[in-house]
Image (tube, rainbow, N blue to C red):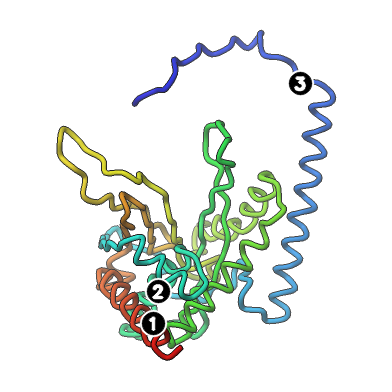
Amino acid sequence: MFFTRPLEPPRPRDEEPAPTLDHLLHLLREQLGATKDVSRALMNVLRASRSKDRSLVAPLQAPRSVINQKISRNRRFATQQYSVERLRRVAKAHGGTLNDVVLALSAAGLRRLLSEQGALPDKPMTAMIPVNVRPKDDPGGGNAVGAVLASLATDVADPVLRLEAIIASTRRAKEQLQGMSKSAILQYSGLLMTPTLLSQLPGAVGRVRPAFNVVISNVPGSDVPLYFRGWRAEALYPLSIPFHGQGLNITVNSYSGMLDFGFIGCRDALPHLQRLAVYGAEALEDLETLEALEARSS
């Protein structure tokens, strides 16, 4: 581990300044404000659910699926790699973000694989997407990660319409967080995750609707090549952990102009998992072909 400055010795407890009344009142006001923001966001989700607004995803809206059951100890790991610039071109052409295209490729692979196995849910599958809530100039340690839910539109056959549905869903999810404090986002994210914790109770897995179907994470990495004893690292494929109720995890890591996908899941719950990597690549080619056709016709 390398440090840019010397480590300062920890301050003894008896030297730590006692919190002032103004500081305590500030914390209290911050928590009260966060609670109001969270209540407002939950009401938005409730209203969207009642109006059958599919773009704003609520917890427990996810359909039951084969990847949300009790899993075995057997694992399968697959990888895929794309140029960041290639994905950004597709995202720009459709008015979305790089992360929207990541979700679209994952959704396309899931839809095709589950269709082949006769296990594709009729309703759109959903994803939990971790989001960083730490400001760029925040030097604090520890994790500061929130969460949003988004539709994968796996019930939509047309790849362009599926991507558009994903873009609309992630946009609504981000709007939920706009104007929220860091504390409010963490509170709201905790409430979104609560059903997942409840599903870990003995006998609950597979009997209750999942809070979401799959976690899809996009983790920023190094923009420049890394070396170890003169050997250049060609790719950095992330490896996560499936658990009961979440038999598939998709994590993406950016590295030196590339985006490295890591698919890991229960081999018994999701046979032929490696096809997700292949089908995602074919889905990207389909989007690029459609993009070129639309460019010619305009």
x, y percent for residue 232: 18, 42
Task: Return the residue nearer the eye: 289 or 81.
Answer: 289
Badge 1 crowding class, 10 Å Cα cut-off, few under 14, some 14 to 19, many 20 or more, is: some
Q: Residue at x 77, y 42 (%)?
A: 31
Q: Residue 290's x, y, as percent?
A: 38, 84
Q: Does residue 82 appear to the left or right of 165 in the view shown?
A: left
Discs 3/2, front: 3
Instruction: Please state which of residues 263 and 8 is positioned toward the viewer in this rendering.
Output: 8
Of the residues under marks 1 and 2, which one precedes in the sequence? 2
Q: Are marks 1 and 2 in contact (CB under 8 Å)?
A: yes
Place residue 48 in its image quadrant.
bottom right
Sequence-first tag of 3 and 2: 3
Give residue 85's quadrant in the image. bottom left
Q: Dot 1 lies on which element?
A: loop
Please say if the residues under marks 3 and 2 sit with CB atoms less than 8 Å apart: no
What residue type is disc 2 on?
Val
From mark 1 to mark 2, how far is it between C-alphas? 7 Å
Instruction: Look at mark 3 in the image and give the residue it sits on.
Output: 19
For the point 42% across and 86% down, the residue is 294
Q: Is residue 5 left or right of residue 51?
A: left
Residue at the disc numbered 1: 119
Identify residue for label 2: 66
Q: Nearer the viewer, residue 259 or 24?
A: 259
Residue neighbourhood size for the residue with mark 3, other residues' Cα within 10 Å, grouped as few (<14), some (14–19), many (≥20): few
Q: Is 115 rendered above or below residue 267?
A: below
Q: Report x, y in % for residue 297.
A: 42, 91
* Vertical position of residue 152 compared to residue 18: above or below: below
The crowd level at tag 2 (other Cα within 10 Å; few <14, some 14-19, many 20+) is many
Q: Residue at x 37, y 79 (%)?
A: 287
Q: Determine the CA span between mark 3 and mark 1.
A: 57 Å
Q: Is residue 252 left or right of residue 141?
A: left
Q: Amino acid under label 1? A: Ala
